[in-house]
């Protein structure tokens, strides 16, 4: 067995909202912000995408 855990880390909704707000306000890339706050770029990118859809700005939302 390897030392890497198969369990994914869970973040609060507040943390996710703050991270998305930081991406939007900072002018930095998702990858740059993810690196700074210690999360995966893919996970943060998904949060930004979901936030965009929730705000009604997703390209596939009718």
Image (cartoon, rainbow, N blue to C red):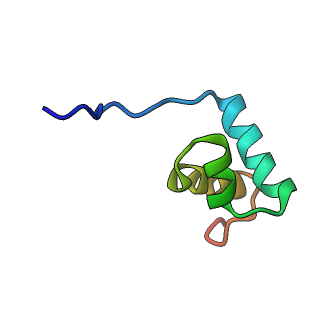
Most distant residue in the left direction:
1
From the viewer's perspective, is 6 left or right of 24?
Answer: left
Q: Is residue 12 or residue 3 the one in the foreground? A: 3
Q: Quarter of the image holding residue 62?
A: bottom right
Residue sitting at x 72%, y 43%: 19
Residue sitting at x 79%, y 48%: 22
Q: How many marks?
A: 0
Q: Is residue 16 or residue 37 the one in the foreground? A: 37
Q: Quarter of the image holding residue 49?
A: bottom right
Is residue 59 shown above or below 54?
Answer: below
Residue sitting at x 46%, y 31%: 9
Instruction: Estimate the x, y position of residue 59 in percent, counting from the top left.
Output: 66, 72
Residue sitting at x 28%, y 35%: 4
From the viewer's perspective, is 27 left or right of 34?
Answer: right
From the viewer's perspective, is 60 left or right of 21?
Answer: left
Instruction: Estimate the x, y position of residue 53 in percent, counting from the top left.
Output: 67, 57
Instruction: Estimate the x, y position of residue 39 in percent, counting from the top left.
Output: 56, 43
Instruction: Estimate the x, y position of residue 26 in percent, counting from the top left.
Output: 84, 56
Is residue 21 shown above or below 24?
Answer: above
Is residue 2 shown above or below 29?
Answer: above
Most distant residue in the bottom direction:
59
From the viewer's perspective, is 15 left or right of 42?
Answer: right
Q: Quarter of the image holding residue 24?
A: bottom right
Picture quarter with the N terminus:
top left
């Amino acid at each position: 067995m390897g030392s890497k855990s198969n369990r994914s880390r869970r973040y609060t909704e507040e943390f996710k909202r703050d991270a998305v707000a930081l991406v939007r306000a900072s002018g930095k890339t998702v990858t740059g912000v993810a690196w700074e706050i210690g999360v995966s770029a893919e996970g943060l990118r998904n949060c930004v995408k979901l936030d965009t859809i929730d705000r009604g700005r997703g390209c596939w939302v009718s």
